[in-house]
Image (cartoon, rainbow, N blue to C red):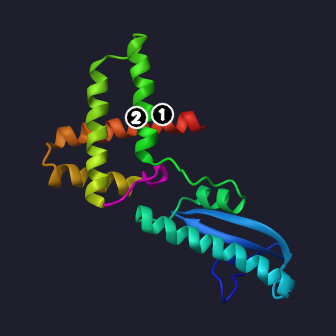
Amino acid sequence: MKDKENKEVVQLYGKVFIYYSNKGLVYRHPTKIPWDEKNLPQNKEVIDSLVKKVRDAVSQHQKEHNTNPPRDYIRDLIRGKATTEKKNLMDYYNEFISSKKDQVKTGGLNPNSIGDLNSLKSALGGFEEHSKTKFQISDINEDFIGKFKDYLLTVKNVSENTAQKRINSLKVFVKYFEEKKG
């Protein structure tokens, strides 16, 4: 059951939870406040403070990144672990390229592969600039890939083969990130 005043306040197991959802990923923060006591002044103050924290974070993130923040960012913020410096897609991609350069040095990767990775980096940077958005790793999904491919074909005027090469490199990066995170 949701609170009529705040869409961020929900009841679960008879308790008040702060609710946030983005791209199908949900975070419910337990407050330990009984649902039937949520309107007591001291409880209302705690709940309102958490709701304000979520709303402020969403608003700030929308201004800076033109998108809602990832679920994990809100979770960390409410838990008091959020940092002011969050890595964006390009930060992670730069780490990826560095790891691949190390593989070239040890002979585990063809040096020509770095050229493809740098081309993708340039294309992603151009896509961010074109979209006026600093993308997060959590933004990469089928919709993102479709828009990125459309950007490559229509704005950058690359061939279908080149666009597919960039998409394939992007998928290799995503797989690397998921394995590293996993």
Query: In the picture provided, is 62 more to the left or to the right than 3?
Result: left
The vertical placement of 123 against 78, above or below, is above
| 83 within the magenta span | no
Q: Would you say the residues marked 2 and 1 are in contact, meaning their CB atoms lie under 8 Å apart?
A: yes
Q: Say which of 177 and 24 sits in front.
A: 177
Q: Say which of 36 and 99 sits in front.
A: 99
Measured Cα–Cα span from mark 2 to mark 1: 6 Å
The residue singled out by tag 1 in the image is: 176
Question: Please, what secondary structure does the residue beneath circle 1 have?
Answer: helix
Query: In the picture provided, is 175 more to the left or to the right than 145?
Result: right
Mark 2 crowd level (few <14, some 14–19, many ≥20, 10 Å Cα): some
Residue visible at 18% across and 38% down in the picture: 161
Residue visible at 31% across and 39% down in the picture: 121
Residue visible at 41% across and 38% down in the picture: 93
The vertical placement of 17 against 85, above or below, is below
The residue singled out by tag 2 in the image is: 172
Question: Please, what secondary structure does the residue beneath circle 2 have?
Answer: helix
Q: Say which of 161 and 82 sits in front.
A: 82
The vertical placement of 181 against 47, above or below, is above
Which contiguous range is marked in magenta? Answer: 132-140
Query: In the picture provided, is 46 more to the left or to the right than 92?
Result: right
Residue visible at 26% across and 49% down in the picture: 126
The vertical placement of 139 against 67, above or below, is above
**Secondary structure mostly taken by the magenta-highlighted segment of the chain:** loop
Identity of the amino acid at label 2? Val
Residue 28 spot, x, y in % from top left: 70, 66
